[in-house]
Image (spheres, grey):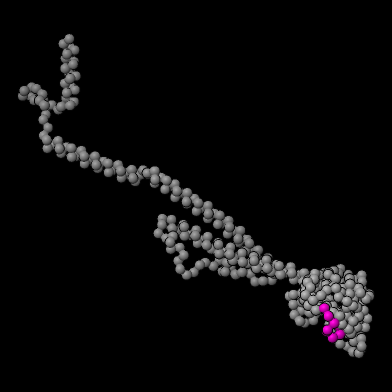
Amino acid sequence: MLGICAGFGKFSAFWIMSKVKYHYDPESLSFKRVERKKGKTVGYGIMFVLAALLAGLFINFIAGKYVATPREKALSRELANMKLQFEIINKKMAQAEEVLSDIESRDNNLYRHYFETNPIPEEQRRAGFGGVNRYKDLEGYDNSELIIASQKRLDILQKQIVVQSKSLDEIVKLAEDQEKLLASIPAIQPVNNKDLSHMASGYGYRADPYTKVNKFHYGMDFTAPKNTPVYASGDGVVVRADSKSSGYGNHIRIDHGFGYVSLYAHLNKYNVQVNQRVKRGDLIGYVGSTGRSKAPHLHYEIFKDNERINPVNFYYGNLTPEEYNELLLNASIQNISLD
């Protein structure tokens, strides 16, 4: 029982000492309670508060510097995504520049060469933008250099596309004109070979059938029976179908555009009227012997820019090489013309 009490006393003393401070007095051989001074207690409290504040500030500084807030994390992810998008855009622009460069090369070296027009100068294609600073509003940001460089690249690419687009519009127009030109040029013989009796006379000096004096014959005479069909040698518009031109009798003139006009003289009758649009190979009239003519035949002429030219150079549309060589031979013979 005494042992239990002694143990309990030691435990009680320990618990009490944990709350209250004592010191040993050797003179009285006993423990005396330590009384705290109020000033020191206040000082300890103030020091504790200051220490807590400093510790809080330090922890907040460390956390602010090395530990991101949820908003900062979100902004950081957004910025990283924007940089990634800029990289993707720049890669796409690089691909577009490569494709555009190939189109520009074909434009200058193929299309424009084919249509015999001047290529677009490189400095015109690559020209930048002068004058005021177009990118002032993009300055002053952390990634201004990246944004401005990308914007400049995009602006130049857009300008190159505009230049190339206009060039292709011009090429399309040239192609349409070329197609129209090829269809309009008087490129076939106006009388079928199967209907011809012979080539009576070609372009050049020939003996006049009435005076027997050599004079320049400005067309080609195709001998054929009366009422043999005569065909338009190219697309165009009928500008004359009358007998009011001296010596030609009943004749037709077709304006093919591009400076070309074809003339069909000594006709027996017409199959067209003025202002009628015709296609190459359309039936326009019939062989006759009206006007200053010795026998039924078609007198055929071609004008280029109001000057008569040799029609023999325009029969590639419906003659074989053998037929064309025979025509050249017959047209070169200096015989008597029929008109």
Q: Whole-percent x and y of residue 41? A: 14, 35
Asked if residue 45 is among those painted magenta in the image, a careful observer would answer: no
Give the quarter of the figure containing the N terminus. Answer: top left
Judge left or right: residue 80 versus residue 17.
right
Q: How many labels, in total?
A: 0
Q: Residue at x 45, y 48 (%)?
A: 78
Q: Whole-percent x and y of residue 55? A: 26, 41
Q: Which residues are magenta?
A: 241-248
Q: Whole-percent x and y of residue 234? A: 80, 72
Q: Nearer the viewer, residue 108 or 310?
A: 310
Viewer can see residue 307: yes
Q: Residue at x 11, y 30 (%)?
A: 35
Q: Whole-percent x and y of residue 174? A: 69, 69
Judge left or right: residue 222 versus residue 25.
right
Give the quarter of the figure containing the C terminus. Answer: bottom right
Q: Quadrant of residue 29?
A: top left
Q: Nearer the viewer, residue 258 or 20?
A: 258
Q: Quadrant of residue 37?
A: top left
Q: Residue at x 53, y 60 (%)?
A: 154
Asked if residue 245 is among those painted magenta in the image, a careful observer would answer: yes
Q: From this viewpoint, which residue is outermost toward the top?
A: 1
Viewer can see residue 313: no
Q: Quadrant of residue 246?
A: bottom right
Q: Nearer the viewer, residue 54 or 136?
A: 136
Type of secondary structure dominating the magenta stretch? loop
State whether residue 315 is above or below residue 154.
Answer: below
Judge left or right: residue 278 versus residue 338.
left
Q: From this viewpoint, which residue is outermost toward the left?
A: 27
Q: Residue at x 76, y 79 (%)?
A: 304
State whether residue 67 is above or below residue 220.
Answer: above
